[in-house]
Image (cartoon, coloured by chain):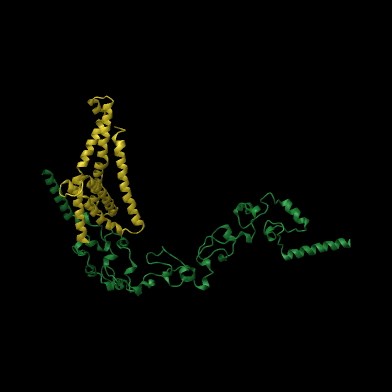
Chain colours: A yellow, B green
């Protein structure tokens, strides 16, 4: 376990996720440095639109559209949702006063994390597990011995599967917070 | 089905919280202190889906009186001889400059003013709003602010041109610049232009050759001649070549007894390039002639 999934899959994921947050901070800094913070406001619209487009995959999955392949649309979803999320993070900056936009940002970050778990960890972890099991079997271990050896890896994967399941409910609340935010902006702008 | 039920309840709760506590949930910040009494009455300024109409601001703040009557009670607080600033703005959209939602600091509630809102005729009348700085530099230059300053910020993009300085003050560098407090500038004259140009301070055109030519035998550390980096003094005895005994011997042999200030005659390391001043030469020759006469008399 120690040298298994956590080292091979989880840590790279955390590094990758941190890089995404860091890139949003750098972008925000650049906007402030060059005194072009007004771009941040427009990134809110652009980011939301980008994320909405990425939902074509969800429509395909629920058979509401015919065009496109699931694999292609999934890649499309991952790429656009991530790009849109970075834009929204830059749009939010760190100067939010009220609670609702903070909650929306928090939910956005959690949502990206849950999506990335599906993309980068779970797929890879399943592959790693499969290979590990095959090697242990080749070395002549019984099923029971193999189960003992990979116990903690299986626990980690089970937890990750649960984490992935919350992707949809979180998306719902992200949509709800975003909608209230947009309505309040239109109402008071 | 059960999950949908939970979603609906949570959604209703969230919307309910937003409706009950709109200020906490969606307000971008407290209002500027003078407007704090409007903090929870959003629609006293905002009109639903229509932004913030100027009328809502002007109903309290008459544009023609801003700068004359600015306090809360409308009391006359100044008789302003300057341009009535707000009255002459091209675009009288209050929120293009005033946000009011950035907290309690009034300065922060102002968005960055853009001079583009000013009419062409007022844009060049800088001193109507800005006071000319009372310092030596600004006392000496003409009133054309835009020659050096831009409208984006006062200090950045300054392209000062010394041509703007009145002729009578042009050589008075130290009226604006300070003489550097180092040994070298301590002994130099006040004629900065002999080394420095008006375009930039560095590089200067100081030439050591004017005092002493540093030929290939004299390319050494400053402190070899200027002991303790004291540029006010120098010595030629800092190297083995010029010992006091040698120098004394050579000069006395020629009948020269005043050899303390080497560079008064030697402007380079070339032993044939000796520029003894005329008086000293005359003195030397008359002395030699006198000695010869005395020898003849004997």
x and y, in percent, of residue A104 in the image: 23, 51
Picture residue at 59% right of the left edge, 62% below the top: B188
Name of the residue lying farthest toward the right: B298
Quarter of the image with the C terminus of chain B in it: bottom right
Q: In the image, is B244 to the left or to the right of A108? A: right
Question: Residue B83, located in which quarter of the rendered image?
Answer: bottom left
x and y, in percent, of residue B151 in the image: 37, 67
In the foreground, B153 or B38: B153
In the foreground, A67 or B225: A67
Residue B139 visible in the current orientation? yes
How many numbered callouts?
0
x and y, in percent, of residue A163 in the image: 22, 41
Say if A19 sits above or below A137 in the image.
Answer: below
Q: In the image, is B6 to the left or to the right of A101? A: left
Name of the residue lying farthest toward the left: B1
Residue A106 visible in the current orientation? no
Picture residue at 67% right of the left edge, 58% below the top: B268
In the foreground, B99 or B159: B159
Quarter of the image with the N terminus of chain B in it: top left
Q: In the image, is B39 to the left or to the right of B113? A: left
x and y, in percent, of residue A50 in the image: 24, 53
């Amino acid at each position: 376990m120690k040298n298994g999934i956590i080292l091979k899959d989880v840590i790279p994921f955390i590094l990758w996720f941190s890089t995404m947050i860091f890139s949003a901070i750098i972008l925000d800094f650049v906007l402030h440095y060059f005194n072009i913070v007004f771009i941040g406001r427009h990134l809110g619209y652009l980011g939301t639109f980008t994320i909405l487009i990425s939902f074509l995959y969800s429509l395909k999955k629920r058979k509401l559209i015919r065009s496109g392949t699931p694999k292609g649309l999934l890649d499309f979803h991952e790429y656009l949702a991530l790009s849109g999320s970075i834009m929204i993070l830059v749009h939010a900056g760190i100067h939010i006063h009220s609670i609702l936009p903070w909650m929306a940002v928090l939910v956005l970050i959690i949502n990206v994390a849950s999506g990335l778990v599906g993309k980068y960890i779970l797929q890879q972890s399943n592959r790693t597990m499969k290979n590990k099991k095959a090697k242990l079997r080749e070395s002549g271990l019984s099923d029971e011995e193999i189960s003992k050896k990979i116990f903690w890896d299986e626990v980690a994967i089970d937890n990750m599967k649960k984490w992935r399941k919350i992707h949809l409910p979180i998306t719902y609340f992200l949509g709800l917070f975003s909608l209230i935010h947009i309505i309040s902006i239109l109402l008071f702008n | 089905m059960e999950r949908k039920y939970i979603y609906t309840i949570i959604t209703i709760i969230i919307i309910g919280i937003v409706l009950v506590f709109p200020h906490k949930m969606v307000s971008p910040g407290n209002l500027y202190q003078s407007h704090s009494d409007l903090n929870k009455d959003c629609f006293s300024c905002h009109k639903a889906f229509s932004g913030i109409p100027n009328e809502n601001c002007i109903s309290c703040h008459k544009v023609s009186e801003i700068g004359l009557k600015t306090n809360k009670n409308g009391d006359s607080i100044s008789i302003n001889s300057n341009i009535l600033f707000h009255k002459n703005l091209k675009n009288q959209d209050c929120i293009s400059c005033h946000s009011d939602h950035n907290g309690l600091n009034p300065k922060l509630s102002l968005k960055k003013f853009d001079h583009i809102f000013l009419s062409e005729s007022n844009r060049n009348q800088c001193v109507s709003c800005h006071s000319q700085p009372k310092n030596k530099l600004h006392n000496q230059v003409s009133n054309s602010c835009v020659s050096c300053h831009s409208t984006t910020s006062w200090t950045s993009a300054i392209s000062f041109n010394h041509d703007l300085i009145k002729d009578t003050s042009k050589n008075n560098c130290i009226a604006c610049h300070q003489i550097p407090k180092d040994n070298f500038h301590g002994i130099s004259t006040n004629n900065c232009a002999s080394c420095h140009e008006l375009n930039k301070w560095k590089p200067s055109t100081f030439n050591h050759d004017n005092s002493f030519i540093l030929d290939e035998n004299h390319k050494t550390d400053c402190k070899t001649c200027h002991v303790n980096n004291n540029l006010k003094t120098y010595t030629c005895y800092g190297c083995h070549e010029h010992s006091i005994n040698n120098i004394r011997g050579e000069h006395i042999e020629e009948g020269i007894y005043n050899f303390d200030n080497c560079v008064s005659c030697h402007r380079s390391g070339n032993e044939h390039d000796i520029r003894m001043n005329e008086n000293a030469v005359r003195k030397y020759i008359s002395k030699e002639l006198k000695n010869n006469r005395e020898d003849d008399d004997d």
